[in-house]
Amino acid sequence: MDPAAWLSRNAVDCLPTGGLEAKLAAAERDGRPLRVKLGIDPTAPDLHLGFTVVLGKLREFQDLGHTVVLIVGDYTARVGDPSGRDSTRPVLAGHEIDANARTFTGQALTVLSPKRLELRRNGEWLDMRAEELFALMRTSTVARILERDDFARRWTAHAPISVLELLYPLLQGYDSVAVRADVELGGTDQKFNLLLGRDVQTAYGQPPQVVLTMPLLVGTDGERKMSKSLQNYVGVTEPPGEIYGKTLSVPDGALAEWYELLLGEPMTADAGPRDAKRALARALVERFHDADAAREAEEAFDRVHVRHEVPQDLVEVVVAARDGVVHVPALIVAAFGGSSSEARRLVAQGAVKLDGDPVRALDLPPDEVHGRVLQMGRRRFARIRVAEG
């Protein structure tokens, strides 16, 4: 298979037609690698498996000798990407964005090679003078920006669209100008932005980039795209047991897609859903941890969910009784984190247990808590000790 066909084989779009072939031929003729761009806004501290679909495609470019330019959007994150949104995206504080950005490099290297990798922050060039910003804004029109599906829906519904959001696609396009991108990758929800980047490059006298869009990975709910805000994600830095257990929760109907997008191979034809999920879960844990961690994660899962035994590596949590009782929401927060309101909701849903029995009350006598195993959901356990006095 020729390089262009190989690189575009599982992409949704490769635009314009014949463009990638032409870029590869020109790079070979000039004796230089292509510059292949991906921008990620650090709106959350962790990358999830959905990001690795595009990262995996970038790695294929690296393996063929090309340079990946990974842009951490520390400035575009201050605007908020409106892609796929029906309302204005909440904007994080600057210190939150900076903290998230610091975690991205190591996580991206779980897929990418440190060789042929250029890491940039778009604050390098988007902290521009007003005159430069005005010149960028002249490269497009409001009518062109409103062609985006999400903006068009909101306009029709008379939902608010901020001027700052209208600027976002232009800022992303200017990233391509700043790094002189030959190719830009993104999910299918990024198609408009990536194509607009071609217009912006042309306005700045650069050859327009080729656009590759990759499928959006469905989350563990099997319905919506993987997203931290939807709580249907698997993080690449999560503990082995979390990756393994979350993968086993994927609906049968999503398995073929997960195999294709995450492993790059079809499911074994004669494997049932149970065995296919276990093989997938082991492969993902091994990728982001190692083979020993995958075996231990599977054994730990079977111990709890197949043999109904208590986990071996229980964390012990010490709490104090107040006014002669242990407040269960406070106990849950001490053991697993989160908020008291979320803890009360989980108790009401029957998702909290002590030694396997659902907790029904928000306050319990100390002797009904001391020494017992607190369980929240299917995979989180802690042994509770009530401090004397």
Image (tube, helix red, strand yellow):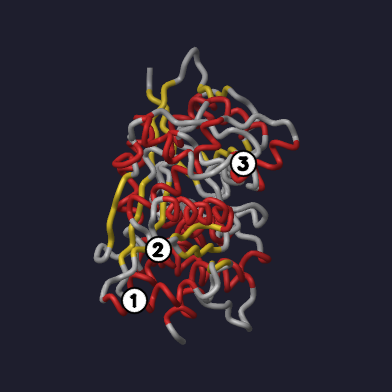
Residue under numbered circle 3: 85
Q: Nearer the viewer, residue 18 or 347?
A: 18
Instruction: List x then y, in percent, for residue 189.
Output: 58, 53
Q: Which type of secondary structure does the marked residue at label 1 adopt? A: loop
Which image quarter holds the C terminus? Answer: top left
Depth order, front residue of 193/307: 193
Toward the bottom, the furthest residue is: 1
Q: How far apart are the two marked residues, 3 and 1, measured between alpha carbons?
A: 35 Å
Identify the secondary structure beneath mark 2: helix
**Which residue is disc 1 drawn over?**
64
Asked whether residue 373 is in view, the answer is: no
Q: Dot 3 lies on which element?
A: loop
Q: Left or right? Give the position of 230 relative to 179.
A: right
**Three-letter amino acid code at the position of disc 1:** Leu
Tell me: residue 42, above or below residue 286. above
As drawn, 129 above or below 170:
above
Camera-near label (1 vs 2) is 1
Look at the picture and state if 363 lies above or below 153: above
Q: Residue 96 versus residue 158: which sits nearer the camera?
A: 158
| Residue 18, percent from left and from top | 51, 75
Give x and y (percent) for residue 199: 49, 53
Circle nearer the N terminus (3, 2) = 3
In the rendered image, which residue does mark 2 sit on? 296
Picture coordinates of residue 118, whole percent (x, y): 27, 57
Label 2: few (<14), some (14–19) or many (≥20) C-alpha neighbours in 10 Å: some
Asked whether the residues under the numbered discs 3 and 2 touch, taking CB atoms below 8 Å apart as contact, a structural biologist would say no
Q: Tell me the amino acid under the disc marked 3.
A: Arg
